[in-house]
Structures are given as C-alpha cells and as structure tokens.
C-alpha cells in the first residue's frame, strides 16, 4: 500500500492560512481600529484634574500646584498680586487680568460703594458654593473690596461661537460636545437649586447676553458659574420667594411670572409685583441650550429629541415645569441614545 504524503495526513502546514480566516482577521482589525476612532470621537474633552473640592474649605489649588494653599489674605493680595490689564467691567465689579506667583488670575474690584451689598453677597456665595460647578476662589479682601479667582482665558460663555470658529477648536465643534456643554449648564442650575446654602435662583438672567456673561468657558470646554452677585434664596417651607430686581421686566426670555401682571393701564410698582421661585430658571433652559447647540451638523437632530422636555420647560404654569434634575436626566438619555445609534450605524457600514 502506498503511503500518503505526510502533509495530507496532518492537514495544512503551519504557514498556510485559509483565505476566509485571513479575511476574518482583517475585519477584526478594522473593527478594533473603528472602535478606537469612535471612542476618540465621542469622548468629551478631558476634564481638569484640578478639583477645588479636593482641598479643605478655605483652601485652593490651581494650575500645576501640588499642594493646597489657604485663601490669600489682604496683605498677600496687596503685595503678591500684580495687575496686568482690565478685561471686563459690570455694574458691580471691574475685572483685571493679574499675576500671582506666575499664575494668571482674575482680580475683581468693586466699582461703586453703592453696589457693595451685591459685591459682598457675591463673595459670600463664592465662599459657600466652591466646587466643580463654580470658579475657584483664591482669596479676598473686604477692606479693599477685592476678590481673586482663577483666570480662564476663553472668557465668558458669550464667546462660545467665536471660540469654536477657530481652527484649533474644530475638533470639539460637534453636536456631542455642544450637548455636553448644555448638560454642564443644567448641572449648574441643578446645583444652585440644591446648594449647601439652600435653593438659589440665578437672577442676573433677564436676557440671553446677560445670562451668558455670568458663566465662564474653560480651556477644557466645560462651564463654570462665575458671577454670583444675584443669587437670592427660595424657601418653600417658609413661603420665602424672590423677585429679580426692582424694575419692570419685558420680553419672552424671562418667565411669564416675572412680567407685570396688571396690564399697561396700571403703572408698575415693585411692592405690587408678585414674587416667584426657582422655576424661572427652568423656563430659560431651552433658550440657553439652543444657543449652546448652535447651528452645526447634528444640532437640529438634538433639538428634535429635546423637543418634549423643552416644551415642558416652557409651561405657563411654573409648577408644571420639570426640575433641573429632570432636564439633566433627559439630556443624558438623549446623548446616550444618539451615541448608540451612531455607533450602530458605524458597525453596519463594515
């Protein structure tokens, strides 16, 4: 009997791979590369590793500082902080880009003694609300009416479109990152409504530009509350409500309950104006989010998925509006749903 060749008994040599197996290996490699690319595309910009909450109360850490430092005193502010140039001014404060131990910082000074109560209220809120949602406080001096905070070069949130139009930021000018900015904003509102010092209402928000000016855009493309000069307290259990200012408000941006309810024939009187609660912040969420989403590819798709929750935010009856937590949870679900849909479409393309 003839002997069969050795290779016929043992099958293929180790170096021979069937074409089908090779194709499967190539497809597996393509899948791996695709998922790596998708992960890079969908993951938000890395948040700063510096978290002021990692320091004890009354201390801060910014930039590359390894240790926490106590809030700077009047003497330290006078001798260690060097003003460079004025970068902003409002009714309460003027702000100077300054330098402290090679760190760029923001030095705020009271503009007028008539506004000192607002200035001191903002300082108290900064001290009480330190955390991931609020700009980092570095020091203050009540004698000199000065406050020192961390400097963020991208400035206020009103600069968002101008910033994202720069070529170096094109990689974050996507509906995903813009929706995450909207989530940042709603997270801040939710934090203020459940803050360590009670339910706080963002009163400096009577129009879109004014509202945007109250927040900072960080280099990591997140949002921080910055101007806390008008954060009155709501206490439902004791019936304590608020009024944002002492003048008549107009326009669609403010909530209906903030408008003079007695018609044009009755002159406005602050003592007759009814007070209201934190649901005025909810009314404004759709307008702020629409600005943050912008008009880029995919933003209208996001608006469509947020239509129902935004419609609820615009309820004429304040008690029927959702809470900030409800809105935030809906935003998260929409982000996850749309990401999953895009991942599924990408897999089907293979």
Image: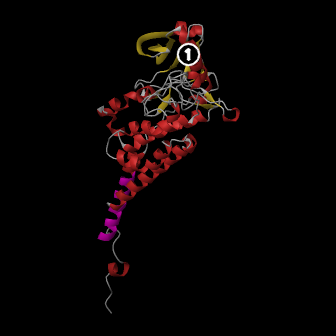
Magenta includes 319?
Answer: no
Quadrant including the N terminus: bottom left
From this view, report whether residue 138 is shown above or below residue 84: below
- Where in the figure is residue 277, as x and y percent of width and height? 59, 33
Quarter-of-image position of residue 324: top right
Percent x, y of residue 21: 34, 68
Write down the quadrant of residue 193 in the picture: top right
Q: Nearer the viewer, residue 113 or 145?
A: 113
User: Of residues 156 and 46, which is closer to you in this image?
Assistant: 156
In the displayed structure image, the side of residue 193 where residue 33 appears, left or right: left
Q: What residue span does the magenta drawing correspond to?
A: 19-35
From this viewpoint, which residue is outermost toward the bottom?
A: 1
Image quarter (top left, top right, bottom left or bottom right) of the C terminus: bottom left
Residue position for label 1: 119
**How dense is the environment of label 1, judged by Cα within 10 Å: few (below 14), some, or many (20 and up)?**
many
Image: 185 above or below 347: above
The residue positioned farthest toward the right in the image shown: 238
**Up-down: is 93 above or below 291?**
above
């Amino acid at each position: 009997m003839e002997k069969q060749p050795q290779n016929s008994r043992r099958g293929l040599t180790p170096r021979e791979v069937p074409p089908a197996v090779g194709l499967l290996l190539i497809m597996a490699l393509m899948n791996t590369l695709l998922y790596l690319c998708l992960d890079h595309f969908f993951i938000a910009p890395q948040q700063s590793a510096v978290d002021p909450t990692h320091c004890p109360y009354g201390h801060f850490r910014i930039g590359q500082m390894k240790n926490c430092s106590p809030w700077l005193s009047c003497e330290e502010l006078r001798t260690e902080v060097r003003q460079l140039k004025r970068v902003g001014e409002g009714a309460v404060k003027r702000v100077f880009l300054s330098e402290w131990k090679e760190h760029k910082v923001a030095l705020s000074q009271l503009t007028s003694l008539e506004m000192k109560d607002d200035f001191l209220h903002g300082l108290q809120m900064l001290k009480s609300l330190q955390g991931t949602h609020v700009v980092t406080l570095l020091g203050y001096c009540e004698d000199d009416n000065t406050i020192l905070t961390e400097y963020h070069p991208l400035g206020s949130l009103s600069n968002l479109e101008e910033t994202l139009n720069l070529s170096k930021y094109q990689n974050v000018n996507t509906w995903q990152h813009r929706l995450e900015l909207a989530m940042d904003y709603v997270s801040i509102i939710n934090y203020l409504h459940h803050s360590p010092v009670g339910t706080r209402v963002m009163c400096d928000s009577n129009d879109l530009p004014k509202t945007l000016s109250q927040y900072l855009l960080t280099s990591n493309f997140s949002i921080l509350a910055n101007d806390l000069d008008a954060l009155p307290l709501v206490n439902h259990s004791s019936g304590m409500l608020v009024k944002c200012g002492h003048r008549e408000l107009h326009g669609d941006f403010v909530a209906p309950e903030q408008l003079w309810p007695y018609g044009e024939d009755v002159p406005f009187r602050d003592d007759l104006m009814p007070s209201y609660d934190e649901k005025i912040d909810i009314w404004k969420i759709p307008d702020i989010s629409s600005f943050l989403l912008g008009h880029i590819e995919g933003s209208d798709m996001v608006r469509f998925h947020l239509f129902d929750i935004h419609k609820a935010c615009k309820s004429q009856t304040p008690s029927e509006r959702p809470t900030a937590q409800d809105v935030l949870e809906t935003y998260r679900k929409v982000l996850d749903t749309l990401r999953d849909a895009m991942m599924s479409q990408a897999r089907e393309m293979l």
